[in-house]
Amino acid sequence: MEATGLDDFGDRWFERPMDVLLDAIAGEARLNAAGDFSAMQQFHHVLRDRLLAQMWFKRHPEILARPMPRPVVIVGPMRSGTTRMHRLLASDRRFSHMRSFETISPLPRPDFEEVLDGRREDFRPVLARRIMKVARLANPRTLSIHPTGPYEPEEELGLLVASMWGMKHEAQWHIPAYGRWCEGESAVPAYRHMADLLRLVGWSQQVSSLRPWILKTPQHMLDLPALLEVFPDARLIFTHRDPLKVVGSAASLAWNQTIIYSDHADPARMGREWLHKTALQVERMRAARDSIPKERMIDVQYEDMERDWHATMERVYRFLDLDMAPALPGMEDYMRRAGALKRRPHAYSLDEFGLTSGDVLDRLGDYVCTFDVPIEGETPPPIASRRTMRA
């Protein structure tokens, strides 16, 4: 409030997860000096942006009146190909999407009207480039795990962080108490605020409000009922991948962030946590699907995208009732750029995190059978129960 001269944070619901998060950081995260400084900066940034959001809503009431028709939401566990699907669809100018610099800084500065008038440059892409450079210097592996750039399409997870909500915090700090608390709460207030921030981002982009949004973040697997309450006409693309790869890759992603902020990260504890989180995501996704009309959802296998992304995207476009031809040049351009961005393969293994294939399949073997998820590489141990009907 002192930094901005503003005092309206909007819906104060966010204070509940914030209190739990602060307690968990103080009691569990064991931050180093860099982690402590980063956490203080992050909280200041999020709270400032809540104040700026309310300022923009008051200054331009038309923002909150922007419709958000039939968003396309990509729903899948971490590392299941959601980023590739998101960026391929974002190559199609018939859709709206967020860019990386908007995920980092979703709120325009108070002088943004001058940017719209052409009298000033938007500083947010410059800031995003600096932040990405620092992150890569702190841990060079981040680029190979999640290649990106300031203008690359990016997920809206930062808009949920605006309500102190979501797995981003758990992939950044060891805070299991916060994770368990969130698992027992409704995310509807966080998703309502996210929707309003998307309206603000769309307004700042000066794009038509009739263009459907492309959304994706693994958080949606945990919060599908909340997402569908806020976006009741959403169309859903479910991505599936071998859980032996998903769990190992998710643990590796979290590990490579956590070790920046704490000198006490435990790989075995990390493995157990992300096995739990992945299994819970799948469980909640399967429960939520029972109430979703089948014509509003489609399943896509990671292996199918690896084998023939073009044919798989044609199937997705038939589901969306759109001609893919106008989007194809943009998709092909993205695939070329993706190859240039990714400097080396993301290397990881389950045993790095104290897990075996049996541990993972004990929790997720039924998911593999139900959705016919191909196991990558060598043949896994036999799975006791097999289903022939898809959920």
Image (cartoon, grey):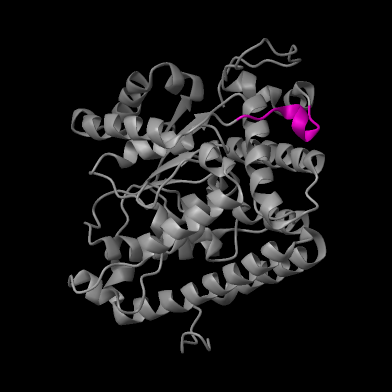
Expressed as whole percent of the image width and height from the top left, the position of residue 55 reads 39, 80
Expressed as whole percent of the image width and height from the top left, the position of residue 68 reads 32, 56
- Pick the front one: 370 or 203: 203
Does the magenta segment cover residue 349? yes
Q: Is residue 345 left or right of residue 244?
A: left
- Check the image and report above or below for 270 versus 126: above
Q: Quadrant of residue 362?
A: top right
- Residue at x 30%, y 50% (from the top left corner): 96
- Pick the front one: 378 or 291: 378
- Pick the front one: 70 or 106: 106
Q: Is residue 270 left or right of residue 104?
A: right
Name the quadrant of the C terminus: top right
Expressed as whole percent of the image width and height from the top left, the position of residue 50 reads 48, 74
Q: Is residue 157 visible?
A: no
Q: Which residues are magenta?
A: 347-355
- Residue at x 78%, y 49% (from the top left corner): 265
